[in-house]
Every structure is written in structure tokens, then in C-alpha cells.
Image (spheres, helix red, strand yellow):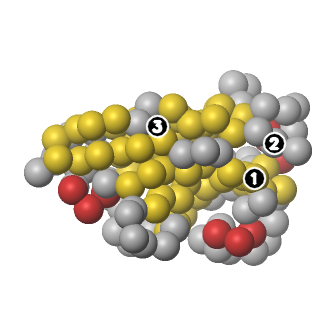
Amino acid sequence: QVQLVESGGGLVQAGGSLRVSCAASGRTFSSYDMGWFRQAPGKEREFVAAIMWDGRSTTYADSVKGRFTISRDNDKNTVYLQMNSLKPEDTAVYYCAARPRSFSSMELVWTFPYWGVGTQVTVSS
């Protein structure tokens, strides 16, 4: 089992930057694919970015490609999401998620069994 705790959310102006982090418990972090998802009020939870267990492959939603960067530090059991050129439409609760390494697409929310409680990111116009 993996426990996930997000941090680093907050309020930022449009065009600004923010980095959110996700600290994971357990000694098997390096064997988990990690993902970031977000949910805005009244909308479904959507995929943002994901990184394979070994960090060799990343994938991004089209809406954040070129602006967001996902990374991980397996020594620190932490995954990061660097968000640049933020837009008001990026406002949402951002969730960290983990799954045992898999060949399934990392964009599929239901393939991730472990979730954090989320951190609010608000981008003002």
C-alpha cells in the first residue's frame, strides 16, 4: 500500500508558475508509475501528466503540454509537477496518484488505485 500527500498548491496570477509535490510512503515507490490528475468544480477528474516507475517515459494532456513538467526523485519518494504559464482554466484540485508498474496507458484514471487528498491550485486572471 502507498500513502500519498500533496503539497505546494496555492493562489497564483495568470502567467505565473507553481510547483506541487507528492510525497509517498513505503519502500516500493520506485516500482510505481505516478500520475497527476485534476478536478475543477462541476467537472470530471482529468488526466494531467504521468511518469513511469523508472522515470524513462512521461506523458501529458494536450492542454498542459509544453507548460507543465512532471519529474520524480526515487531517493526522496517524491514526484513533482512544475507548472509554468498558468492559465485560469488550470484552476482545480490537483491529485497525485500511484499504481504498480503497468503496460496500460498512464492516462487512464481507473488504473491508479492509490490517491492523495489533493491540493488546491487557483489561477487568477
Identify which residue is drawn at 17% across, 47% down: 124
Question: Residue 18's spot in the image, x, y percent?
Answer: 34, 37
Give the residue type that dot 3 points to: Val
Identify which residue is drawn at 83% across, 56% down: 100
Question: Residue 99's spot in the image, x, y percent?
Answer: 78, 57
Residue 74: in sight, yes or no? no
Kindly identify which numbered label has been placed on residue 114: 1
93 or 70, nearer to the observer: 93
Give the residue type that dot 2 points to: Val
> Split into 4 quadrants, where in the image is the N terminus?
top right
In this picture, residue 59 sits left or right of residue 26: left
Are discs 3 and 2 less than 8 Å apart at CB?
no
21 or 116, nearer to the observer: 116
Q: Rounded to the nearest whole Å, what is the CA distance between mark 3 and mark 1?
A: 18 Å
In this picture, residue 61 sits left or right of residue 107: left
Are discs 1 and 2 less than 8 Å apart at CB?
yes
Q: Quadrant of residue 23?
A: top right
In this picture, residue 38 sits left or right of residue 2: left
Up/down of 11 relative to 122, above or below: above
**What residue is disc 2 on?**
2
Secondary structure found at label 1: strand
Q: Residue furthest top?
A: 76
**What residue is disc 3 on?**
20
Q: Residues within 10 Å of mark 3 (few under 14, many from 20)?
A: many
Q: Residues within 10 Å of mark 1 (few under 14, many from 20)?
A: some
Secondary structure found at label 3: strand
Give the residue type that dot 1 points to: Tyr
Q: Rounded to the nearest whole Å, what is the CA distance between mark 3 and mark 2?
A: 18 Å
Residue 21: in sight, yes or no? yes
Secondary structure found at label 2: loop
Sequence-first disc among 1 and 2: 2
